[in-house]
Image (spheres, grey):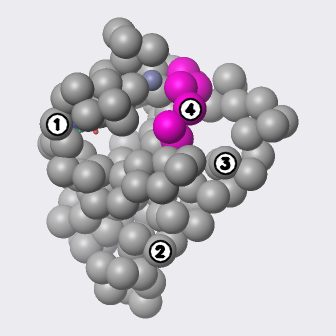
């Protein structure tokens, strides 16, 4: 989708600090980090919101969680801990309508989240 910011990052029309990519997903540094580690992991497939994930996407979403774990481990956060967050629609604060998994670590996280 040419009008989607994250599709444009995937196609490299818009620069991003990409930290991982494979056939199914890419991961890049959030432009406005909320923690020492703040990476966004997104599918190459344009899916606007969590409620648009279909049965055929199960493997894709599972793969994204595997990638989140690998990136966190590679940065030394598997022991201390980290958080994976996905916001859906207005009340959760979703601002980019291409699903993305925030991978946060390197500081103590509060609960419940704000
Ligand atoms: P959300 O509010 O859950 O939709 O999160 C969108 C995230 O995308 C925010 O954390 C933004 O800081 C991040 N973001 C917006 N534009 C860019 C960009 N060009 N490159 C990297 N991250 C971005
Ligand atoms: Zn998109």
- For ligand 1, tell me if the residue under mark 2 lies within 8 Å: no
Q: For the residues carrying marks 2 and 4, which lies nearer the camera in this image? A: 4
Residue marked by disc 1? 15
Between 98 and 107, which is closer to the camera in this rendering? 98
Query: From the viewer's perspective, is 37 left or right of 111?
Result: left
Residue at x 23%, y 46% (from the top left corner):
30
Q: CA distance from mark 3 to mark 2?
A: 15 Å
In primary-sequence order, the first of circles 3 and 4 is 4
Residue 45 is tagged as 4
Q: Main secondary structure of the magenta part?
A: loop
Q: Position of residue 87 (x, y in %)?
A: 48, 35
Image quadrant assignment for residue 10: top left
- How far is disc 4 from disc 1 in space, using C-alphas? 18 Å
Q: Tell me how far mark 3 sits from mark 4, CA to CA.
A: 9 Å
Q: Of callouts 3 and 1, which one flags the residue occurring earlier in the amino acid sequence?
A: 1
Residue found at the far right of this picture? 55
Q: What residue does disc 3 label?
A: 60
Dot 2 and dot 4 residues touching (CB under 8 Å):
no
Question: What span is colored magenta in the figure?
Answer: 43-49
């Amino acid at each position: 989708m040419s009008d989607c910011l994250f599709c444009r990052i995937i196609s490299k029309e818009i620069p991003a600090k990409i930290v991982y990519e494979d056939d199914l997903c890419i991961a890049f540094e959030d432009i406005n980090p909320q923690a020492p580690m703040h990476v966004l992991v997104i599918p190459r497939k344009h899916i606007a919101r969590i409620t648009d994930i279909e049965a055929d996407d199960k493997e894709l979403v599972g793969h994204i969680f595997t990638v989140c774990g690998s990136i966190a481990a590679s940065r030394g956060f598997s022991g201390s801990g980290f958080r994976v967050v996905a916001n859906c629609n207005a009340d959760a604060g979703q601002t980019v309508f291409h699903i993305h998994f925030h991978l946060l670590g390197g500081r103590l996280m509060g609960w419940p989240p704000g």
